[in-house]
Image (spheres, rainbow, N blue to C red):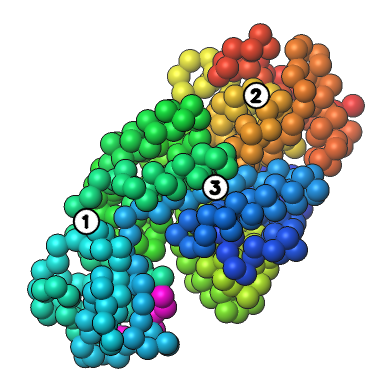
Amino acid sequence: MMSGIHAGTATPSGPGLRLTRIIATIGPASSDIGTIEGMIRAGMDIARLNLSHGSLAEHQEILSRIRLVSKELGRQVAVMIDIPGPKLRVRSLPVPDGSLLPQEKVILSADPHDGEIGIGPASYIPTVCEGDAILLADGAVLLKVTCVGETIEAEVVSGGSIRQGAGVVIPGRRPDIPYANDELVQNLSFAVDLNPDFIALSFVGSAADIAVVRSFLSEKQVQIPLVAKIETKYAVDLFDEILEAADGIMVARGDLGVELPIAYVPHVQKEIIRSCNKAGKPVITATEMLESMVEHGRPTRAEVTDVANAIADGTDATMLSAETSIGKDPARAVAMMAEIACETERHLPYRQILDERRLWHETGPSGIISYSACYLANELESKAIVAFTRSGITAERVSRCRPGSPILAITPDEQIARRLLIRWGVFPCIHAPIHTADELFFISLEMAREKELIASGDRLIIIAGNFAGVQGRTNMIKVQNVP
């Protein structure tokens, strides 16, 4: 081993046991049952259904397939429905290959004629001025506006190829429409009917946008965790209030990288991850993480380093988009993400991370006990931390401290189990309600053995909330020797 390079003091138990969660987008390349099964076996924890593409009926069928396959495999897999925001997209192209050359003159229109690029919806087109930049397909093509009238005339500054459905971003400009527009309401109604484990909200600009969605869900008498996607300058500027209002955060680097100067993105990503870690809310890092695997069987070294750095910075989950939705081998992309995560986690300085988070946990007995469980697991080299939780809060508190040991979360609620899959290091196990401490100790040993985490002579750290059914009260911890 090279001098000065060493693993952390606590290494995740078992070869290939992964603490970072993996979210994978389902699309045309991965919607069949066989590919879904391959992705689950490779390590997909959460399947993302992006309503920006495909019909609602197709997404409904895909969700049914995910539930069916996960049940057959005996694996918990959560589903996240990604709700489109007011995003402009390319709706039609004048040439099939979508190739644009530098200095070429182009016309963009909501009602295109021959030779024009169609963009829309029309209500999403903001006020545009001469000299504005327009970026297509996550910045792959750059245009400069030369004239504005009934159409937008522009010159290609940086050329490339685009396809129908590609995003259109005009940095610094926003459409003058309410966040809760007709399309959002339609998509939310669809999501409510499917009852996913998470809803991701695109183009969130403020806490008020989240409040509008939460109010809609409340009227429907459902509670679904809301993940705010940070992908505009407005969201970055108002991040603190968005973080407080949301249940989780996604660093959506595609549009963020064209809304902001691209060199700003790494720093903004790190700051968002750190803020989420301190607040105890899950954070997802997304977009182009293994982009080359859309076409190739192996990622670039830069992509591997990007994934590893996001994990080292504290992301709860990494997300695959085009790699699994339209890529050549979705399951292989998931397997590669899992391999990178496992190797990165072997070298994280868990004691150093724990020391830093000593001041981040909640005050009061529940927060202190959860932190103490992680401290004991590190000092005693415990193979796992077992958390009994009805609401999920006990396991979430432990995850917040980033232990190097896996967290077996025992819960009687199947949906709570799936929702815990967004949390670092949590492995949910479903069991009938537990009523006594002795019962918990016995079941903890049985489940840890079943997962092949422990052997005779090992130690488990067991933590639990109130057995009387009071949610969120963590008040018991035990060091259990394994007979």
Residue placed under numbered mark 2 in the picture:
389
- Residue 329 falls in image quadrant: bottom right
What secondary structure do most residues of the magenta stretch adopt? loop
Residue at the spot 38% in from the left edge and 85% down from the top edge: 98
Q: Nearer the viewer, residue 111 or 266?
A: 111
> In the rendered image of this protein, does residue 51 appear above or below residue 440?
below
Q: Check disc 2 and give the amino acid type.
A: Thr
> In the rendered image of this protein, does residue 44 appear above or below residue 240?
below
- Report how far apart the C-alphas of labels 2 and 3 lie in the structure: 22 Å
- Image disc number at residue 103: none
> In x, y percent, where is residue 109?
23, 74
Of tags 2 and 1, the one toward the viewer is 1
> In the rendered image of this protein, does residue 348 appear above or below residue 447?
below
Q: Earlier in the sequence, mark 3 or mark 1?
A: 3
Residue placed under numbered mark 3 in the picture:
80
- Residue 399 falls in image quadrant: top right
Q: Check disc 3 and give the amino acid type.
A: Met
Of tags 2 and 3, the one toward the viewer is 3
Q: Nearer the viewer, residue 369 or 316?
A: 316
Q: Is residue 372 visible?
A: no
SS assignment at label 1: loop
- Image disc number at residue 175: 1
Of tags 3 and 1, the one toward the viewer is 1
Q: Check disc 1 and give the amino acid type.
A: Pro
> In x, y percent, where is residue 112?
27, 78
Residue at the spot 62% in from the left edge and 69% down from the top edge: 29
- Mark 2 Cα within 10 Å, few/some/many (few <14, many 20+)? many
Magenta residue span: 159-164
Quadrant position of the C terminus in the picture: top right
Q: Earlier in the sequence, mark 2 or mark 3?
A: 3
Count the marks: how many? Answer: 3
